[in-house]
Image (tube, grey):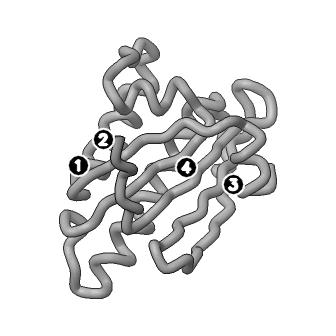
Amino acid sequence: MPRAAAPDYVIIFDGGSRGNPGPGYGSYIIRTRKGQEARRRLDFEETMTNNEAEYRTLIAALEDLIGRIERTGKDPSAFTLEIRGDSQLVLAQLQGTFRVRAPHLRPLQQAARERLSRFREVRLVWQPREASASELGH
């Protein structure tokens, strides 16, 4: 089987809360094909569930990447993107294999899918918790 071409961009994201629910936080890395990286740590300063923090972190990363691309005068639809995270729930909901049952997650899933739809191709990849912690430091 042929190996998939390397994506133009990779986003690695993770979010959580201190308590569930509790104060939310997250972090992400945006990596280019050439190996350049942008890292960001987020503190949401409000009470949320782990899954809300995961979605909000991914949305922030997507907005950051879209803004970076557009500031260069290009359109995100010209690029491929790989999303890596350890939240099986969020990734499966974005793929449509899990329904979004929690009403408070529906607008977040919709916001993430709208941003993902701006790219030519998106690959969602689950990775073990240890890989996320190693890359992001939490």
Give the CA distance from mark 3 to mark 2. 23 Å
Marks 4/1: CA–CA distance: 17 Å
Which of the marked residues, 4 or 2, is nearer the chain's N terminus?
4
Residue 32 horizontal side relative to residue 18, left or right = left
122 left or right of 57? left
> Which residue is disc 1 drawn over?
117
Residue in the image at 44% along x and 67% along y: 64
Q: Secondary structure at mark 2?
A: helix
Q: Tell me the number on the disc at residue 43.
A: 3
- Contact between marks 1 and 3 (CB within 8 A): the answer is no
Q: Amino acid at mark 3?
A: Asp
Per the model, the C-alpha gap separating discs 1 and 3 is 26 Å
Q: Give the answer, above or below, for where 79 lies relative to 36.
A: above
Q: Earlier in the sequence, mark 4 or mark 1?
A: 4
Distance in Å between CA atoms under marks 2 and 1 = 6 Å
What's the amino acid at mark 4? Thr
Number of numbered callouts drawn: 4
Callout 1 amino acid: Ser
Location of residue 116 in the rendering, given as x and y in whole percent from the top left corner = 30, 49
For label 1, count other residues whose C-alpha is less than 10 Å away and answer few (under 14), some (14-19) or many (20+): few
Q: Which mark is residue 113?
A: 2
Front disc: 1 or 3: 1
In contact (CB < 8 Å): disc 2 and disc 1: yes
Check the image and report above or below for 126 versus 103. Answer: below
Judge from the rendering whether residue 41 lies leftward or rightward of residue 69; answer left or right.
right
Q: Work out how far the residue at label 3 is from the one at label 4, CA to CA, in angstroms.
A: 10 Å
